[in-house]
Image (spheres, rainbow, N blue to C red):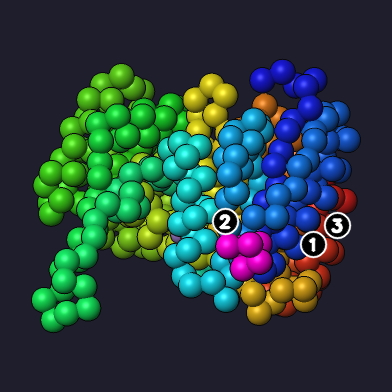
Amino acid sequence: MVTNKALKIAVIGGDGTGPEVAAEGLKVLNAVSKLENFKYELEHYDFGGDRYLRTGEILPEGAVAELRTFDAIYLGAVGHPDVKPGILEKGLLLELRFQLDQYINLRPVQLFPGVETPLRDKGPKDIDFVVVRENTEDMYCGVGGFLKKHTADEVATQTAIYTRKGCERCIRWAFEFTRKRNNPKKMLTLVAKTNVLTYGHDLWWRTFQDVAKEYPDIKPDYNHVDACCMWMVKNPEYYDVIVTTNMFGDIITDLGGILQGGMGVAAGGNINPDPGGTSMYEPMGGSAPKYTGQNVINPMAAINALGMLLEHTGQPAAAARVNKAIRHVTGTKMKSQAAGKMGYSTQQVGDLVCEAL
Ligand code: IPM
Ligand code: MN
């Protein structure tokens, strides 16, 4: 990417506290763009629960085509207490992941200095790995249905779809990523359940073995997902990079999220790595409706997501600066990462990161 061209970012603040935390990320963007001397343009979109309740529409016609024209999407949070669970998740978040073919969900599990982890005797050196979650297949495809619904004989199916193309592109990206990450371990762990899912995860297993041959410098490793949960708690330092399926990736990254201090910190990127692809970066926390407008939610996850956005849109120096500033603030200023317990307001945390840049 040419760095003198303005970075075009679509902002979807979303529901609840989403817009508040996104605003702090954008504050950091403004500050770091001056220090690193790059230009950007923002376009705000009001997609989310409120708009849906007002208009009955989640993504208006043409919205996806418009979003495609941006270099990146920066998302606050989706989820509204007056909207039935599943509607916004499916209609907005999953819809964008699928339509924009963001086939990588990149979720670093990184304990920042000063942040409390529930793991006794583990510190920032021990908790530092990355989960590469496939983001377009599996049980998320919405394939299935009901038979004899609402009767005693009801049948429900929810089919996991795995394709050679889908797992291969994700596995190959994960090998490339492991190589670039260049951790001394140089190890990529496939996390699946080959002892039970003897068709779908056999496809993952065989594909992993095939692609591994192209990366002799990377150690290929395998864990069953249940064992992985145990190891993540007992020996998180074992891991370098994990590659896994959509559903398992969803579950183990919540476990990862709490190891790194919870939803106030954890961030992720929904990445379409293809040329011209539009990726979307988001804090992992939800919309926390009961805290809306109180200025108490930790924006660090949103700032962290902003750092990831910069890393992947041709601004690695700015990203490094943001990451360093986050570490400085968590390590020296904040009491806790929990809402209302930080010792600072949402906006003050954003200010502290800007000062530390
Ligand atoms: C996540 C979330 C989503 C998912 C939900 C909100 C659909 O849990 O980003 O991990 O399951 O992927
Ligand atoms: Mn999840």
Q: Give the range drawn in magenta.
A: 51-56
Residue bearing mark 3: 351
x 87%, y 51%: residue: 355
Placement of the C terminus among the 4 image quadrants = top right
Pointer 3 with pointer 1, Cβ within 8 A: yes
**Is residue 353 part of the magenta span, yes or no?**
no
Of tags 3 and 2, the one toward the viewer is 2
**What is the crowding at mark 2: few (fewer than 14 residues within 10 Å), some, or many (at least 20)?**
many
The residue type indicated by label 3 comes to Asp
* Percent x, y of residue 168: 30, 30
Cα–Cα gap, marks 3 and 1: 5 Å
Which label belongs to residue 349? 1
Question: Between 117 and 298, which is closer to the camera in this rendering?
Answer: 298
Mark 1 secondary-structure assignment:
helix
Q: Position of residue 256 (x, y in %)?
A: 46, 58
- Given the image, on which type of amino acid does mark 1 rest? Val
Q: Which of marks 1 and 2 is nearer the N terminus?
A: 2
Ligand 1 within 8 Å of disc 2? The answer is no
